[in-house]
Amino acid sequence: MGMVRRLTGVAVVLGMVVMAAGCAKAPEAELAGAKNAVDEARKGGAEAYVAEAFKGAADALQKAEEEINAQGGRFALTRNYDKAKELLAKAKADAEKAKADTGAAKEKAKGEAQAAQKEAQAALSEAKGLLAKAPKGKGTKADIEAMQGDLKTAEGMLPEIQAALDKEDYLGAKAKAQSVKDRAASVSGQVQQAMKQKGKAGKK
Amino acid sequence: MLVVGAGLVAGWSVDPLPPGLPGRAEQTEQEAWRAGAAELLPERYASFRHRLGDTRTKFLEERLRWGPWQDRERFEREFADLTEEGTALVQAVQASAVALRQDTEGLLHGQENRLARLRDAAMTLGMQMEHDSLASAGLALLEARTHFEGGHFERARPLIESAVGHLTRAEAQALAKMRRYADGPTVNRWGRWARETADWSRVRHAAAILVSKAERRLWLYQDGRVVKDYAVELGYNGLPDKLYEGDGATPEGRFRVTMMKGPGQTRFYKALLLDYPTPDHRRRLLTAKVQGRVPPQKTVGGLIEIHGRVRGEDDRTSGCVSIRNEQMDVLFEAVEPGTPVTIIGALTRDNPVAQKAEPLQRPPGSRI
């Protein structure tokens, strides 16, 4: 009788173990959490600002999905999702870090673009001021008009810079601001050169 | 029983498929991505990634099988193939990146040169240009250069394309003004005027003046021979023939000195007033108005002179011919009212304007 009871106990324990193993389910909540974190990072612009970190998170998510698929093909009682869970945790943590780093990188790019925007505006103001004082003559009228045209075209770029900033296209905004600054500086240089020549002519 | 048991234990304990087997293939995928595969060869990269993921899933399934049943050779072969494919992909991406860089650099450099040539032509020939087009092209190329230097070729290329459009418009406008300087019959007519001016001077034993706009020279003739050769400045819109008041162009034609203005009579030291406009100039303006090329309110203008210069002011004019004051003294001694003054576009077909026009007329591809 004691033997029967012992065997029954062993059978119950074995049954519980088998039940426990049979209950190993795909880590759906973890998968959804990791997917959501990667999506959030992507929406935040991580692909552009912290590309390497974002790829690490996306790759970990892909490997986790592959692991889940592989385990899903096994006999139910032998499935083990520990590795998949580990990969999903890594994907989620990496994606969250990528998202946070994106914020910092974006702020840095925004700051640089805004600084370039201010420099472009200052260069334009300086060029316009200098042009107003440019030496006037019959022939310089056309040059002055041409330079005014250049500055007007450059000034027309200012709303485009702001539009790029509003769209969070900081790289584009910075490049546009740089082109305006360069053009304005070129006009200033031409006017200063003309002023210098006029000064020399006056001293003859 | 014992043998079977030992076999089973051995089967579970051995692991013939090392987990790191996909490592090298995965590494090539990383290298390809870093080299820009997703942007440069997106389809090939996506296909490689798909195959890698697929093989990796099968590999994981295989690893979950009982040890002795695992097919190590198959996966070693498959990942070796993938590594080879990945390495080839990295090389292709790198080659593609170099080609894209060179191509973009060529395009950018070509358009920057094109802009420089147009600006140079405008400046050295005193040619008024459509500044909006040049200014827009200049800004687009500056922006493209910033993106190019930052390695953002995909951003640089549309900007270069936009500059091409602006430059094509400006170039067409410039060529429209320059073309007649390379036109045989037009240059021949100017040559005939020049010869007739020299002949007049020889026959009448008197002074005559010839001005060529392309060469920017003034020649004083006495008895049919050139006795003085001076550099001149012209109207700020120097190339076209004058059509109306305020166009900044110097008129072409056969004129006479109608008045000699001494100090106090002109702000330009001394001046020789010409009999512009001639009936021919009036007719040309009328025709242009009828054709709608000139607004009806425009007038033909006047007060075209050969004059001296004002210190500190630009030497170019609104349509007159300017020379240095000491040269003006010489002219003043040599001429009198009635002296012929012929202003032509160019003396020969091989003139500076035609030379500047030549590279602008080449197909765009040959300029890059």
Image (cartoon, grey):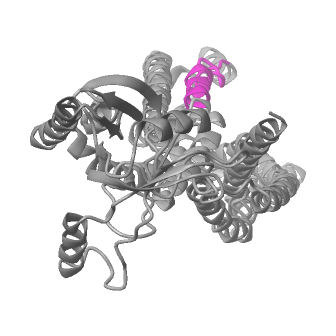
Residue at image position (47%, 16%) is: B80
Image height of B332 relative to B16, above or below: below
The spot of residue B287 in percent (x, y) is 17, 74
Where, by quadrant of the figure, is residue B199 drawn? top left
- Is any part of residue B27 visible from this angle? yes
Residue at image position (70%, 67%) is: A158
Image height of B183 relative to B67, above or below: below
Extreme-bottom residue of the structure: B297
Of the pair B271 and B117, the residue shown nearer to us: B271
In-image side of A145 versus A19 (left or right): left
The spot of residue B75 in percent (x, y) is 48, 22
Q: Does the magenta stretch include residue B30?
A: yes
Quarter of the image containing the C terminus of chain A? top right
Q: Is residue A118 magenta?
A: no
Of the pair A29 and A108, the residue shown nearer to us: A108
Of the pair B202 and B217, the residue shown nearer to us: B202
Quarter of the image containing the N terminus of chain A? bottom right
In-image side of B358 versus A16 (left or right): left
Image height of B44 relative to B319, above or below: above
The spot of residue B304 in percent (x, y) is 43, 59
- Is any part of residue A102 visible from this angle? no
Of the pair B194 and B287, the residue shown nearer to us: B194
Residue at image position (26%, 26%) is: B223
User: How many numbered marks appear?
Assistant: 0
- Segment colored magenta: B14-32
The spot of residue B208 in percent (x, y) is 31, 38
